[in-house]
Image (cartoon, helix red, strand yellow):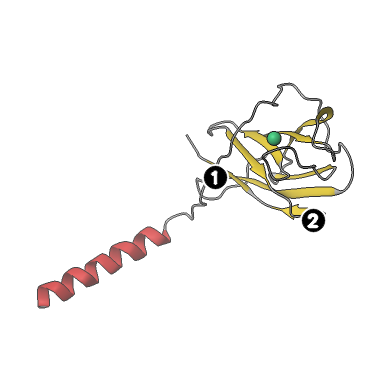
């Protein structure tokens, strides 16, 4: 009995010590690249109006903000067609923050409306994921968490 209690107490101490180490963020879930990605989109933070996405790019290591991370965006227009005008490359600022503004994406066969984004930062695995705005949603606030190498 004493031994069981001691073991339990010890495991609680170990768990508390682990929790006290530098905080970590859960990595953002990847999503399909899809067939419409093109590299080298122009550098810009606005490709239209109707939907604003903002947040911070972070590392799983200590949740640290990642200045200079590169975000590449691509999405369909209101009719569900991909347009080069709706492609952009941008970098996070000194605090790891970004703001991107574009048109609300339309539906195309087999998919709910979505934005694609590919995010890369030195010392981290490149993340490819998607955002799914609800009907009529005009703003999305979200952080992207990249897995540290
Ligand atoms: Fe798509």
Confirm or deny contact between disc 2 and disc 1 (CB under 8 A).
no
Secondary element under disc 2, as helix, strand or loop, is: loop
Q: Secondary structure at mark 1?
A: loop
Residue 43 vertical position relative to residue 105 in the rendered view, above or below: above
Q: Which mark is residue 137?
A: 2
| Left or right of 71 in this view: 78 | right
Pick whichever, 91 or 17, lies toward us: 91
Q: Nearer the viewer, residue 74 or 59?
A: 74
Image coords of residue 70 (percent x, y):
68, 33
Q: Is residue 37 above or below residue 58?
A: above
User: What separation in Å lies between label 2 and label 1 (alpha carbons)?
Assistant: 21 Å
Which image quadrant shows ligand 1?
top right
Residue topped by disc 1: 29
Instruction: Classify mark 2: residues with Cα within 10 Å, few (<14), some (14-19) or many (20+).
Output: few
* Coordinates of residue 6 in the picture (x, y in percent): 17, 72
Label 1 crowd (10 A; few <14 / some 14-19 / many >=20) = few
Q: Is residue 48 left or right of residue 130?
A: right
Would residue 66 appear left or right of 81 to someone viewing this image? left
Residue in the image at 66% along x and 26% along y = 35
């Amino acid at each position: 009995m004493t031994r069981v209690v001691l073991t339990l107490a010890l495991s609680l101490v170990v768990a508390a010590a682990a929790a006290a180490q530098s905080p970590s963020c859960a990595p953002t879930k990847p999503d399909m690249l899809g067939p419409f990605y093109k590299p080298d989109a122009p550098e810009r933070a606005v490709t239209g109006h109707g939907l604003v996405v903002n947040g911070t790019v972070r590392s799983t290591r200590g949740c640290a903000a990642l200045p200079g991370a590169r975000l590449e965006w691509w999405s369909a227009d209101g009719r569900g067609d991909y347009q080069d005008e709706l492609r952009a490359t941008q970098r996070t600022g000194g605090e790891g923050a970004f703001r991107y503004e574009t048109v609300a994406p339309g539906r195309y066969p087999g998919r709910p409306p979505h934005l694609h984004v590919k995010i890369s930062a030195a010392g981290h695995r490149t993340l490819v994921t998607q955002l799914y705005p609800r009907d009529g949603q005009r703003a999305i606030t979200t952080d992207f968490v990249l897995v540290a190498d």
